[in-house]
Image: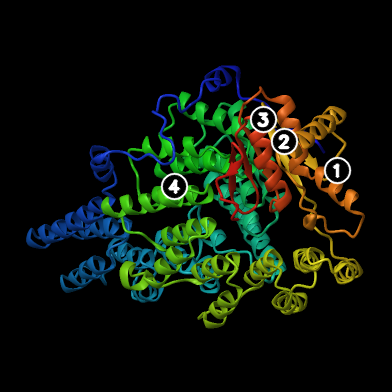
Amino acid sequence: MALVTLVPPLTPCAASSASRDPLDAVPRRSPGTHPGPAAGRRRRRRAGGGAVSSASSSTLSAAVRRLLSDGPTPRAFSALLKAASSASPPCPSLGAQLHAQAVVRGFLGGEDSTILATAVLNHYASCREPGIARKVFDAMPRRNTVTWNALIKGYAQAGRREEAMLLFRNMKRQGRHVAPDRYTFPALLSSVGREVDAGCMQELGGSLHAHVIKAGLEKDPFVGASLISMYATIGTLVDAKVTFDQMDSLDPIVWSSMISAYVNCKEEEGALLAFFNMLCQDIKPTQFVYSSVFSVCGSMSILEMGKQVHAYSLKSNTEKDAAMINAILTMYSDCGCINDAWKVFYSNDNVNAISYNAMISALGQHGYPKEAVEHFRQMKLAGLMPDEVTLLNLLSAFNHAGRVHEGLQLFNSMVDIEGIKPMYEHYACIVDMLARSGEISEAMKTINGMPFEAEAPLWRIVLGACSKHRDIETGKKIAEMLFEIEPYEAANYILLSNIYARLGRWKEAEKVRNLMYERGVDKDDAFSWIEMGQRTHRFGVDDRSHPISREIYKNLDRLISSIKVAGYVPDISFATHNIERDRREESLYYHCEKLAFAFGDLAAPSGGTLRIMKNLRVCGDCHCAYKYFSLVTGREIILRDNQRFHHFNRGSCSCGDYW
């Protein structure tokens, strides 16, 4: 399909609002510029999240001291235990102290101590200590539904599903005075996960759904939302949709769960349509809904829709939390608008570690390693502690820029300087960094020295580097291993075939492709897309299905002639079939990303920026052609492939020809 209308525009009033850039109110800052010292001080004041958490802890400690000196009551103990459980993070030592004092003062163990004992139990459950919570439970002379729910939730949250289910069965045997309610089922449903035995999970989920219906809670928004989320988790979106339709609810929590279910099941268009149906029924979206929709707009790279949703959120005066702001930032970045992502970051009054992580990741993907390092420095100056994600994003920024020395230096200092032990993902990033730079033997040494067993995707990264650097011997060994591990993964065959093809060893290349076809392995078709207004135009290789296909090919032929005059020479090593040279050159002209650019050049005003997306990695010949396209047309071209962003301008690319 060449032309797709994704979703209808927002309501007329929202659309008129969206016609103005929702970011116009914020001064634009471009990559490479930084706030002055005063702005840095403002940023540090805004970002002082650590002070709030420590103040909360000290406030609780002071309240406990006052309680113990003023003759405490069981109700006061219960209130403070609840506060200790609700703190972020919970205060386990404070709760244990309160528990001990309640025992010493004789407040526990009596017939009327159920409320306080339940508060103690709930505290331990919230602190992921279901074993201790169970001891408190067993010692209680009387229990109610709240008590059972607290213990079931504690086991479920600790990942101990079997024990949670056993407690549920025992609860049902207690009689009507402790019957399961709207708080029992969400805890149980949240424990149903996507595991190897999918059939078992579906059976368990269906059984719990039957219990919900028997209890008459199937239309309860709280329970219904949990059912929808459970079905999405186990991958049965149809059942989630049926549950949603049967509820016929206007509760925003239910709609939020359905939109999230579409997102989790990779049904992005369904999520957008659900969002628009929500607006049509005058249901105000929650912050979580907006975060999900921004995530969809980013993953689909539909900028205009993302702008409209952003404008609508501003018009409806939706209060933004940190997660929503970070989702907006990531959406603009994923759509190729790094300047707009930058503006969102600097307009945020509640910058936290996640905000910095999102910005560092965006800068790395767009090829701004210096700016990523500067944000890392600002983050530490603001008193925010880097975490595993921060360092992974920074390593990725070095990786995309080919700054191997700095990447290795950061990796080797993680434990000593940052106090963070490298995880599998950090090792994988270093392997990718070394292999991408041509240090394939060092990449292999790193794999062999990892405290983890390398998984197939990591070996495939090295195989891709072997294809780039034409290391046939290492490539053959890795490919043969991958054929055993993943016999139906097309990329393994294609990468090995490409090594042979680039070396001119056509018989071996054809043999690998024949093996692939004999095993019935289907490869992913390459396609590119470009958004124009409310429509997305998609192109495959040598695609002639677009309504103005004839004009597109005519324009592409003109562009190819122009860039050849400017110095472009087709790189026929990227033509992977053994045909005559002229035909190999011609086969390169009609790659999907070239067709998308030729269409964009026709449809967009002269000299305007074009944003083009591709589902696979851009080939070397198209990358070279795009540099010349930007030179002869005077356009900035932003290309997103499945690895990173490329900003082409005046004949050069932001990646420095390293990707």
Q: Is residue 519 above or below residue 644?
A: below
Looking at the image, can residue 95 be seen? yes
- Distance in Å between CA atoms under marks 3 and 2: 11 Å
State which mark lies toward you, 3 or 2. 3
Q: Indicate the position of residue 178 as horizontal and vertical percent values.
A: 46, 61
- Distance in Å between CA atoms under marks 1 and 2: 13 Å
Q: Is residue 113 above or below residue 277?
A: below
**Left or right of residue 456, residue 367 in this image:** left
Q: Residue at label 2?
A: 597
Q: Indicate the position of residue 120 as horizontal and vertical percent values.
A: 30, 66
Contact, mark 4 vs mark 2 (Cβ under 8 Å)? no
Q: Earlier in the sequence, mark 3 or mark 4?
A: 4
Q: Residue at label 4?
A: 359
**Closest to the observer: 518 or 237?**
518
Q: Earlier in the sequence, mark 3 or mark 2?
A: 2
Q: Residue at label 3?
A: 633
Please report the residue visible at 37 percent of the width from the left and 35 percent of the height from the top: 347
Query: In which quadrant of the rendered image does the N terminus lie?
Result: top right
Q: Helix, strand, or loop for circle 3?
A: helix
Please report the residue visible at 85 percent of the width from the left and 48 percent of the height from the top: 587
Contact, mark 4 vs mark 1 (Cβ under 8 Å)? no
Q: Earlier in the sequence, mark 4 or mark 1?
A: 4
Q: Quadrant of residue 127?
A: bottom left
Q: Residue at label 1?
A: 542
Please report the residue visible at 54 percent of the width from the left and 23 percent of the height from the top: 18
State which mark lies toward you, 4 or 1. 1
Three-letter amino acid code of the residue under disc 2: Phe
Question: Local crowd at mark 3 within 10 Å, few (<14), some, or many (≥20)?
Answer: some
- Distance in Å between CA atoms under marks 1 and 3: 23 Å
Q: Is residue 635 above or below residue 154?
A: above
